[in-house]
Image: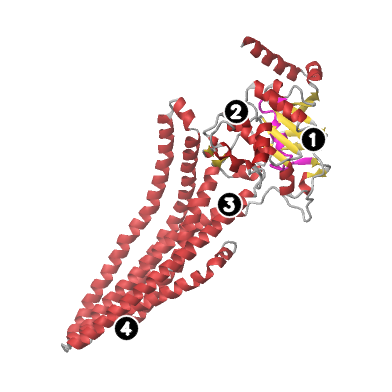
Amino acid sequence: MRQIVPYMKKYLPYAILTPIFMILEVLADIAIPYLMSRIVDVGIESRDVAYVVKVGSLMIVVAFIGMIFGIISAYFGAKAGYGFASEVRLETFKKVQGFSFANLDKFSVASLITRLTNDCNTLGQVTMMSLRMAVRAPFMMVFALIMSFTINSSLAAVFMVSLPLTALIIVVVLTKARPLFMEMQTRVDKVNAVIRENLAGIGVVKSFNRQDYEEAKFKKRNDSLMNTALKAISMIVFVMPILNLIIYGTIIAVLWYGGQQVVAGSMLKGELISFITYITQVMISLMMISMFFMQLLRGIASKDRILEVWNTESEIRVVDEPIKEVVDGSIRFDNVSFRYPISKEYTLRNINLDINSGETIGIIGSTGSSKSTLVQLIPRLYEVTEGRVLVGGVDVRDYDIKTLRDEVAFVLQKNTLFSGTIRENMQWGMEDASDDEIIKALKQAQAWEFVSKYKDGLDHVVEQGGSNFSGGQRQRLTIARALMKEPKIIILDDSTSAVDMATDARLQKVFKEELADITSIIIAQRISSIQYADRIIVMHEGEIESSGSHDRLLEISPIYREIYESQKKGVIGE
């Protein structure tokens, strides 16, 4: 809790005022049964109508004041609870933004979504309950007990049986409920995973007519969540009747013994009525405490899941005095080996490669040859396991991470556009970019040819994920967005696979002529996309099999020659 509590600082005044107003409300609630007893024992007994009206009016005023205190307390509690949750959510989101790809591999996207939404909301609810219910219930119970003993200490001895019995039941139930609440959150993760996967691939599901299969898979996980939730809720369902039985048993005992004292004249009728009211307040307070602790268990589970994210150390280490300038686009892989944190096998082995600033490098290889992994080490999306990667003659680990990534533009395999407009997407590369600068980048990426046809031009709406664009259009827009950064290095990770060969050829010409001062690394499946690169690297099973020009590789590389011949046959066959 020491990690999380400081995030309440912004809402500390509300957190302090909430229990204060809550206690004032409790005092008002405690006063009402006493005033009620005065009406019965004094006003009604002596038939003093004026006294009944006077005390009755006071009861109404006290109840109204208590209601005002309750409303204020509820408002401040909600402000503190959900404000605190928003701060925790923001910090969790910031933490996720600082993760490397290796960290993100540890948590599923669905799990992170659940932690940022469901878990943070639960934490807010528990905080609000802690400031209100966790204050109201104990104070109500203590004050009601004091009033009960003040009215009739001998009759109040009934609590010596009911209170320990109630406490025992609550402890037993909470002990059994805790693991179920932990399991519930895990089940929510799994349900969210299915929902996310299904909605992201809904087109594939429909094209294969797999709706029934997906519904069955969802039903399995949904039922699992339901069953776990029912087990947890059944604990609460079990507690309530037992507590009610204890409450009514206590009231019956008080009516029996209290009634005898009233008959004997040692207790007044109004005192018996108020005593029963105080009993109800004590027992309801116990029920509230049990409900609070049950919710607290969910809060603890959510807190642990949030702290799991917070306490995950980013793979990206920041040096004390990072370098904030990249002098050129030269790249060097110095005996680099890499393996994913969850794997024992090396994905890349003994990579030694020098790339000159302004050079265009093509990378090709069979699926699974670790082409993408190799280039992801340059902007530190992953950290090397062994060896060094140098950019501009400096180890990438010595750079300020923002400086490095500003100078290394990366177009990933999965082309992601964000909802908004084309202009807003382009401004990811340069926040204050003018329309002329955006159009220039779009022209270089061969995207202006279709963007210029839209009536609203740069203000054309981009749907979530760029779903209103074709695959080739998305690729060209993401390349344009990368060019907006005016980087020293640009990496295209199979980013022209959906582009036709004529457009691909024009892109190559732009990179060769207009962007000659930028170091370009192009991963491609088609040899035609990299055929005229300064050098081509052939990857095979995590190692550099060979490198050289297109003609040279046809002579020395059986892998490259096989790829070339298979693609040549495919073109001839068409």
Which quadrant, please, contains the C terminus? top right
Q: Residue at x 47, y 38 (%)?
A: 194
CA–CA distance between discs 3 and 1?
37 Å
The image position of residue 300, as x and y in percent, is: 50, 58
**For mark 3, what is the residue?**
93
In this orientation, which residue lies closer to the viewer: 561 or 529? 529
Quadrant housing residue 10? bottom right
* Image coordinates for residue 238, horizontal then vertical, percent: 33, 57
The residue drawn where x is 31% and y is 76% is 63
Mark 1 vs mark 2, CA separation in Å = 26 Å
The residues tagged by marks 1 and 4 sit, at their Cα atoms, a distance apart of 92 Å
| Residues tagged 1 and 2 counted as in contact (Cβ below 8 A) | no
Q: Is residue 156 visible?
A: no
- Pinpoint residue 103: horizontal percent, then vertical percent: 64, 45
Q: Which mark is on residue 153? A: 4
Q: CA distance from mark 2 to mark 3?
A: 32 Å
Name the residue type under label 3. Answer: Phe
Q: Which residue is mark 1?
A: 517
Please tell me whether mark 1 sits on a helix, a strand or a loop: loop
Q: Which residue was labeled with disc 2?
A: 472
